[in-house]
Image (cartoon, rainbow, N blue to C red):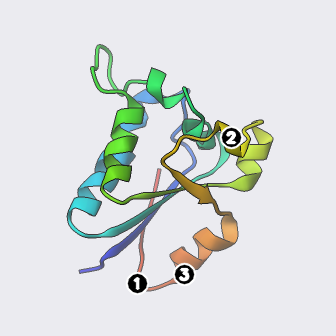
Amino acid sequence: MADKLVMMLLNTTPERPHECGAPFFQAAAAAAMDIEVEIYFAGKSAALLKKGVAEKLYPSDGGDKSIYEFMKDAADLGVKFYACGGALTGHGISAGDLIAECTGAAGGAAYMARVMDDEWKVLGY
């Protein structure tokens, strides 16, 4: 069984909160299985890494657990969050705006290195 998973969030955006919980829940599940997990945030999904955004989003109507809480669960299990530098710039997000759980910035080359490495499985959202 593979023990490394890379995930790309591109279509999972704050405008579609009902779709935002699953990637973090699945990342947390994988990490709990001792799988190394990295999530790359590109395009509008990078806004989820901005302080205050994910805290206000819920994956279901009347839900009691915010997207940020799902993100924290994953991060607490060792999941690494990488923001696309271009997406941050494009959406006016500075390093100081990022949640503490964001590991740092990494772009297309870093993601493609994972995708092309046979040791990593890939999921996209």
What residue does disc 1 label? 119
| Dot 1: element | loop
Circle 2: element type:
helix
Residue 8 in the image: state x and y as whole percent: 52, 57
Residue drawn at point x = 54 percent, y = 81 percent: 116
Q: CA distance from mark 1 to mark 2?
A: 33 Å
Q: CA distance from mark 3 to mark 1?
A: 9 Å
Residue 60 lies, in percent from the top left, at: 32, 23
2 or 3: tag closer to the N-terminus: 2
Q: Tag 1: Cα neighbours inside 10 Å, few (<14), some, or many (≥20)?
A: few
Residue sitting at x 36%, y 37%: 21
Inspect this view and state whether residue 21 appears.
yes
Looking at the rendered structure, the kind of residue marked 2 is Gly
Disc 3 element: helix
Q: Is residue 100 left or right of residue 31?
A: right
* Mark 1 residue type: Glu
Give me the residue at 53% from left, 76% from top: 114
Total numbered labels placed on residues in the image: 3
Q: Which residue is mark 3?
A: 116
Q: Mark 1 or 2, which is nearer the eye?
A: 2
* Quadrant of the rendering where the N terminus is positioned: bottom left
Real-space CA distance between mark 2 and mark 3, rounded to the nearest whole angstrom: 32 Å
Q: Is residue 91 left or right of residue 115?
A: right
* Outermost residue to the left: 33
Foreground: 109 or 10? 109
The residue under label 2 is 96
N-term mark: 1 or 2: 2
